[in-house]
């Protein structure tokens, strides 16, 4: 009877065998198997299928893979793959306990989304980080952690793959993917508060007050001012560092730069 | 016979400390801040600008669309500014700030205490005037009342239920209103009956308010078609669906509106507001608010102009007690903690509750022990522990298939949970996420 069953199974398997494009398997092997969803597809397999099926793959990108493996995939498929600059997640809030006072105590479920739907948060800023770490939970690559001193999330740049998961997780849209620069240098405005200057400043000492000083000093038109909030375009920014000293509230952060000569002398 | 709804429910201690304190008129404050979004639906559009003089009862913002409500000036004075100011959640919303002067009322508003019994308005006029007077449901949800008065085509209302349940512990504003403005309220009920074209109205009152039941019964001898139905004390009896079930035995189908059962529910406060709007020509510019709490010097009920800062209400009740840990807008079950005392009173504010520090924080959440108490008390027959866990783990399909949208956020599950789990917090998250998903699917 066992033999008969085996035979039936064999014949059924033969009859209903589905021919699959072998390239799907090949492409999938090149993908990182992180199933992070950063590409917009539910998992690496689905993304591989999409890559094989579509004629134009210039819109499809795995943020986690390096350009080498993407080029390999392109060669397997014989299609053109667009070059993409590597990106890294940046937390646009610098509301440490020293910069904003605590105005209330949150007692509800430990979830930024829930707290944000209820009120402005413990520190009163309607735009700032709530500090419950939903972005940390969302990260599949262990690249973002809460700093217990600043109570803000911190990104470890070389671990960050730019998969966008933390950006989607943050209910306040604080996290942004920005172009990676040499030596992990970056200049950005660590604030997304669109309130008028006085109101923004009341909530947080290092809020952008929309004064526009940085806009005037920038030679490359990289900084725009909209709704009382300045924004530095990472594509246009040449990292000249002219804007940061202009900011009256220290809302512009310079990361991984050597200490400026003048400042160095002053310190000495 | 004393009725109640059959499924679930809890019995929190009712602590109605201010039940014996008559409604006091709170003096008009120096400035009022009137939010342009005090109701469910689209915010109203301002009709005044900075520097304009306004008079009590003047229309200052017009409702946008069908589900919206007009807003009137609650004082006489000048508009100081129209700005985005923090509301009870701390987020900024458009509000009109008015510096008050002499308290003159707009012409045509009858401010005398005379009761006008004779109803001359037709059904259509009643709906129109309710819309013009900016009346919203005063039970708490602040749903525009004219929408509930306009029965959709093809549907027929056969019973009007008036919600005098006030099942929320601590609050007594509806109770006092029934005692002090009973007759006016009943005329209001007659007006609503005329607008809906129904012959029968039932006032549902929990039997912890025997004085209100007795008082209304004595007035009702003169009025036909209106009866009082005493109800067993049980939270959340004041919820629309539970009240319909308790009074008529009819069940609102899942995902449907109460009108499907032929019942329309209005709050006692709304009935009084409709009386004032139609018989006295007075728009909704003031309401009764309970200020209470264990350590509050004088727990009271105040008749307050819309836009009065919460701080001045608390001041009138004897100030903030020293050990206050939380100030809640509403009752202890469904109310929301306030971020600041400078925020104004709105049409939907039914009470201000000051909770002492020792009782104000939640116990730390422990693991679910699968006791299923939340399941047995859920008045909607849901499984809160399951919904909450599914929502916490972002299993939205499951949250949806377990009927999360039937949840009315009464908070009974969080109240009863022996492990102090934040059940409702996650269910609310699930509710809003699922409704977003459904909306996206429809597009």
Image (spheres, coloured by chain):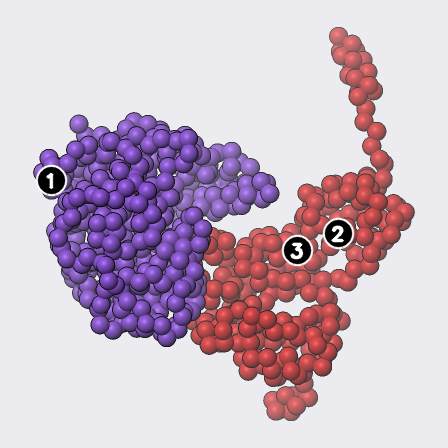
Query: Tag 3: Cα neighbours inside 10 Å, few (<14), some, or many (≥20)?
Result: many
- Is there any visible trace of residue B43 in the rendered image? yes
- Secondary element under disc 1, as helix, strand or loop, is helix
Judged left or right of residue A2, residue B255 is: left
Is circle 1 on the same chain as circle 3? no
Q: Taking B118 as reference, is B401 above or below it?
A: above
Quadrant including the N terminus of chain B = top left
Quadrant including the C terminus of chain B = top right
Give the alpha-carbon distance from disc 2 to disc 1, as whole Å: 74 Å
Is circle 2 on the same chain as circle 3? yes
Residue extending farthest left: B218
Q: Which residue is mark 3?
A: A164
Judged left or right of residue A34, residue B349 is: left
Question: Which residue shows up at 31% across the image and 62% down it?
Answer: B58
- Is there any visible trace of residue B13 in the rendered image? no
What is the quadrant of residue A86 in the picture?
bottom right
Residues at circles 2 and 3 in contact by the CB criterion of under 8 Å: no
Q: Taking A171 as reference, is B370 above or below it?
A: above
Q: Which residue is mark 2?
A: A62
| Residue A237 picture location, percent across and down | 72, 74
Q: Nearer the viewer, residue B105 or A67?
A: B105
Question: Which residue shows up at 28% across the image and 33% down it?
Answer: B198
| Residue B384 picture location, percent across and down | 42, 38
Q: Which residue is mark 1?
A: B219
Judged left or right of residue B113, residue A208 is: right
Chain ID, mark 1: B
């Amino acid at each position: 009877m066992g033999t008969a069953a085996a035979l039936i199974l064999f014949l059924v398997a033969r009859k209903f065998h589905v021919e699959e494009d072998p390239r799907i398997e090949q492409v999938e092997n090149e993908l990182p198997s992180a199933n992070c969803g950063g590409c917009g597809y539910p998992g690496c397999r689905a993304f591989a299928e999409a890559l094989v099926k579509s004629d134009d793959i210039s819109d499809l990108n795995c943020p986690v893979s390096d350009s080498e493996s993407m080029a390999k995939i392109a060669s397997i498929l014989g299609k053109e793959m667009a070059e993409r600059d590597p990106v890294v997640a940046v937390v646009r809030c610098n509301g440490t306990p020293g910069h904003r006072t605590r105005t209330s105590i949150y007692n509800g479920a430990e979830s930024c989304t829930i707290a944000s739907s209820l009120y402005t948060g413990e520190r009163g800023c309607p735009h700032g980080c709530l500090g419950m770490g939903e972005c940390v939970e969302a990260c599949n690559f262990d690249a973002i952690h809460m700093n217990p001193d600043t109570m803000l999330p911190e990104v470890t740049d070389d671990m960050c793959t730019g998969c966008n998961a933390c950006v989607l997780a943050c209910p306040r849209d604080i996290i942004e993917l920005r172009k990676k620069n040499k030596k992990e240098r970056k200049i950005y405005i660590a604030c997304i508060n669109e309130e008028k200057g006085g109101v923004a400043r009341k909530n947080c000492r290092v809020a952008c007050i929309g004064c526009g000083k940085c806009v005037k000093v920038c030679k490359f038109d990289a900084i725009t001012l909209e709704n009382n909030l300045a924004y530095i375009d990472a594509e246009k920014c040449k990292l000249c560092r002219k804007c940061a000293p202009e900011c009256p509230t220290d809302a512009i952060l310079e990361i991984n730069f050597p200490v400026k000569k003048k400042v160095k002398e002053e310190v000495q | 016979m004393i009725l109640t709804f059959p499924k679930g429910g809890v019995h929190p201690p009712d602590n109605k400390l201010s039940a014996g304190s008559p409604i006091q008129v709170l003096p008009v404050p120096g400035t009022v801040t009137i939010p342009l979004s005090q109701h469910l639906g689209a915010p109203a559009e301002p009709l005044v600008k900075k520097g304009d003089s306004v008079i009590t009862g003047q229309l200052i913002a017009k409702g946008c669309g069908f589900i919206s409500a007009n807003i009137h000036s609650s004082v006489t004075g000048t508009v100081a500014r129209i700005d985005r100011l923090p509301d009870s959640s701390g987020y900024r919303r458009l509000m009109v700030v008015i510096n008050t002067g002499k308290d003159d009322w707009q012409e045509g508003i009858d401010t005398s205490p005379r009761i006008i019994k004779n109803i001359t308005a037709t059904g259509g006029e009643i709906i129109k005037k309710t819309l013009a007077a900016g009346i919203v449901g005063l039970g708490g949800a602040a749903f525009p009342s004219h929408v509930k008065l306009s029965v959709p085509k093809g549907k027929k209302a056969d019973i009007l239920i008036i919600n005098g349940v006030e099942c929320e512990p601590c609050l007594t504003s509806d109770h006092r209103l029934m005692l002090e403005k009973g007759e006016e309220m009943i005329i209001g009920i007659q007006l609503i009956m005329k607008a809906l074209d129904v012959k029968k109205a039932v006032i549902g009152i929990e039997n912890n308010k025997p004085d209100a039941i007795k008082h209304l019964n004595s007035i009702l001898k003169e009025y036909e078609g209106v009866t009082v139905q005493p109800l067993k004390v049980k939270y959340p009896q004041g919820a629309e669906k539970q009240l319909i079930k308790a009074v008529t035995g009819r069940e609102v189908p899942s995902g449907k509106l109460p009108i499907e059962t032929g019942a329309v529910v209005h709050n006692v406060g709304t009935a009084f507001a409709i009386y004032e709007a139609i018989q006295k020509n007075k728009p909704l510019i003031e309401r009764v608010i309970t200020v209470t709490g264990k350590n509050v010097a004088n727990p009271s009920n105040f008749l307050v102009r819309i836009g009065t800062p919460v701080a001045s209400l608390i001041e009138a009740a004897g100030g903030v007690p020293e050990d206050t840990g939380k100030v809640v807008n509403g009752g202890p079950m469904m109310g929301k903690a306030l971020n600041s005392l400078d925020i104004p009173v709105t049409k939907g504010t039914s009470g201000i509750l000051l909770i002492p520090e020792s009782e104000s924080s939640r116990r730390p959440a422990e693991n679910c022990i699968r006791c299923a108490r939340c399941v047995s008390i859920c008045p909607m027959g849901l499984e809160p522990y399951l919904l909450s866990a599914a929502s916490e783990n972002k299993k939205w399909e499951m949250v949806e298939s377990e009927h999360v949208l039937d949840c009315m956020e009464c908070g009974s599950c969080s109240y009863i949970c022996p492990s102090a789990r934040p059940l409702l917090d996650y269910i609310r998250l699930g509710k809003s996420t699922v409704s977003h998903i459904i909306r996206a699917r429809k597009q």
